[in-house]
Amino acid sequence: MVATMQAAQEGSRLSLPRQSFTRKLAPKSDLPAESKDAEETRRIVEACGRRCLLIPGNLTRRQFCDECIRRTVEEFGQLDILVSNAAYQDRVPQLEKVTDEEFDKTFKTNIYAYFYLCRSAIRYMRPGSAIIVTSSETGLEGAEKLLAYSSTKGAINAFTKALSMELAEKGIRVNAVAPGPVWTPPNTAARGSRRVKSRNSEARRCSSAPLNRKSWRHPTCF
């Protein structure tokens, strides 16, 4: 089984369970700054006796997304799972302060890359294959100061539903995971965010979430 996964500086911290279901993994990072995390991922995968191919590049570019899928298939001979996990967000208090560049970057990172990768990947997928994307509850409910980000997550939800209808007859599953507030790098890196140094930090409180707090990423899953 071959899985390909995209990740970015804004994506959640990644590690793999020791009993990994994948035999091979080809993660992609859209920023050179993620090389340290990518190398750690490779170390964990190879420690499980699996193979791992790292493909750094810019996921907002169609040519790179196509290259990622092509190189994965060339390296491993097949593609069974696509995980689209890269994302970008920034908190902007008012609509008039959302720049063209900010809006464009958010859409190209969050939805364009997902579209490019799916379009390239499905030609290699067989019955039993799967596409998994990280969405968000903001795509269903919206979120204050996250107009662009919420819009892309709504687009991801609609795209996923439509694609799942198309690929169902081919035996390919398409699913989106839409978590609520989780304290991950997008939250701590975005402008307007309060830095969090501990799990008990006051900044982690969230009245809309269970237990009135954001959840904390766990380093044993992805």
Image: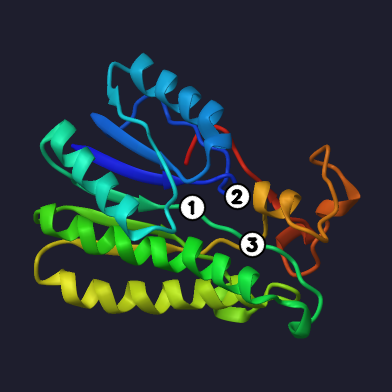
Judge left or right: residue 197 versus residue 100.
Answer: right
Residue drawn at x 10%, y 71% is: 169
User: Helix, strand, or loop for circle 3?
Assistant: loop
For the N terminus, the quadrant is top left
Task: Estimate the x, y position of residue 195 in percent, counting from the top left.
Answer: 84, 47
Task: Estimate the x, y position of residue 44 in percent, counting from the top left.
Answer: 43, 21
Three-letter amino acid code of the residue under disc 2 = Glu
User: Helix, strand, or loop for circle 2?
Assistant: loop
Disc 3 to disc 2, how far (Cα)?
8 Å
Residue annotated with mark 2: 10
Residue annotated with mark 1: 86
Judge left or right: residue 67 versus residue 78.
Answer: right
198 w.r.t. 207: above or below: above
152 w.r.t. 125: above or below: below
Query: Sequence order check: which comes first, mark 2 or mark 1?
Result: 2
Asked whether the residues under the numbered discs 2 and 1 touch, taking CB atoms below 8 Å apart as contact, a structural biologist would say: yes
Residue annotated with mark 3: 89
Residue drawn at x 31%, y 29% is: 53
Task: Estimate the x, y position of residue 34 in percent, counting from the top left.
Answer: 55, 35
User: Helix, strand, or loop for circle 1?
Assistant: loop
Judge left or right: residue 57 versus residue 31.
Answer: left
**Disc number placed over residue 186 in the picture, else none:** none
Task: Estimate the x, y position of residue 8 in percent, counting from the top left.
Answer: 52, 46
44 w.r.t. 102: above or below: above
Asked whether the residues under the numbered discs 3 and 1 touch, taking CB atoms below 8 Å apart as contact, a structural biologist would say: no
Report crowding for label 3: few under 14, some 14 to 19, many 20 or more residues within 10 A (C-alpha): many
